[in-house]
Amino acid sequence: MHKDLIIAMLWSLSPFGEAKVGIPYGMYQGLNEYMVFIVCFLANVLVFPIMMLFLENINRHLTKWRFYKKSAVYVGQRAKKGSGEKIRKYGFLGIVLFVMIPLPGTGVYAGSIAAYLFKMKKSQAFAANTIGIFFSSLIVWLTTWMSLEGI
């Protein structure tokens, strides 16, 4: 049981799944659905400060390496292209909506990068990402719960 909760939490921290994978994993393992929601949601929220630490401190040292710099520019251009217009137009709400959609590539990792690239205030970006994560987690949680109940 503890092992499955830790795995669900790690999925929620992972850029390969976030809470979109952690919540269904935990619920399908038979864990308490409320505990799974809270743990996975909070783990996913932790991604924002980790990403900001990385983007503001570690990123600048890694850009000295050509391969990393090319990759970072590519990711930055994709983030601006994919979400840029919405974020420019809607700001805070744009980040919330972008992070809220439970599809691959629209979570807190992309939301953090977009907020960083568009120089959004950290407190505002954190709030927008947290609200988006909450609604995304709620959508995934409800969908998973309904599938488990056969609805």
Image: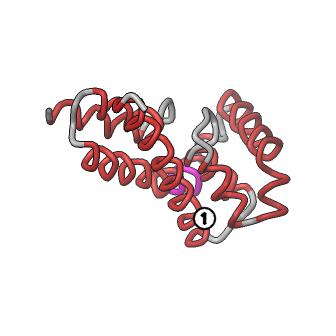
Give percent across and percent down for residue 120: 69, 67
121 or 59: nearer the viewer: 121
Residue topped by disc 1: 125
Query: Residue at left 47%, top 58%?
Result: 49
x and y percentages locating residue 85 in the rendered image: 85, 53
Q: Quadrant of the C terminus?
A: top left
Left or right, residue 40 beside residue 135: left
Quarter-of-image position of residue 122? bottom right
Q: Position of residue 34 (x, y in %)?
A: 28, 49
Q: Is residue 104 above or below residue 37?
A: above
**Along the line of sight, the residue nearer the viewer: 139 or 110:** 139
In the image, what residue type sits under mark 1? Ala
The magenta span reads 52-56
* Residue 20 on the magenta span: no
Dot 1: few (<14), some (14–19), or many (≥20) neighbours within 10 Å? many
Residue drawn 50% across the image and 35% down it: 15
Horizontal relation, residue 135 to residue 30: left or right: right
Q: Name the residue: 38% across, 32% down.
A: 24
Q: Is residue 63 left or right of residue 3?
A: right
Q: Is residue 21 above or below residue 140?
A: above
